[in-house]
Amino acid sequence: MNNSNATPNDEEVMLAFSVEPDHGPVTIRRYIENYPHLASELLDLALDLLMSSEEEPVTLQDLDSLEIQQAWDQFNRMISAERLEPSTEQIKQVEASLVSAEMREIGLPLSVLSAIKSGLVELEGFPGRWITKIAVTGGYAAEILRSYLTRPPALSSARSFKSEVKPQVGGKVTFQSLIENSTLTEAEKAEILRED
């Protein structure tokens, strides 16, 4: 402020308020009582100063691995939710390709291809190289297969006709557990599960 006898202009009042050590309710009330015509501007400035004081950069050390994992899981759920449902034609194309002679030559056992066709394999953890290989062999985009894998498991019509009680669909399994629990040799399992 200029001197003790002169009335400060609005800019000087705002500057004086901004350099106050405390911008709490007591300080705001005092300024509003002395400068009621600046009430709205003082409140806006107080809010801006409060918001800027709370904005501290977050470093990796501030986060623990649980927070990082939760954020990653949330991101994956959002991505999964954005996936479009495959069309009926695309579903038929994927299902037909999974039982084709060409598909049997890619290196996955028939039981794994059958589990994929039935929707029993989760997308999460499904190796990208196998998604690409299946999609290329089947003649469709990898995104169509990803969408297909997000569908709920389907009940085979053969099972429903052969059953005396109402058959139930089991839950999904990971690609890795499907391979590990198969009758493949350890060498075959290792080759299928290897990462590129």
Image (cartoon, rainbow, N blue to C red):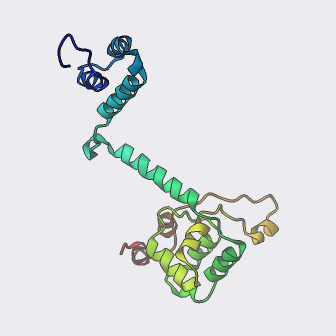
> Looking at the picture, how far across and down is residue 38, in whole percent?
38, 21
In-front residue for pair 88/82: 82
Tell me: residue 29, above or below residue 101. Answer: above
Displayed quadrant of residue 20:
top left
Q: Is residue 195 left or right of residue 143?
A: left
Tell me: residue 11, above or below residue 127. Answer: above
Number of numbered discs on residues:
0
In-front residue for pair 192/28: 28
For residue 69, say whether it is visible: yes
Tell me: residue 97, above or below residue 25. Answer: below
> Looking at the picture, how far across and down is residue 34, in whole percent?
34, 11
Instruction: Give the residue drawn at x 57%, y 65%.
Output: 121
Tell me: residue 144, above or below residue 18. Answer: below
Instruction: Give the residue drawn at x 37%, y 13%.
Output: 29
In-front residue for pair 50/154: 50
> Looking at the picture, how far across and down is residue 75, in whole percent?
47, 53
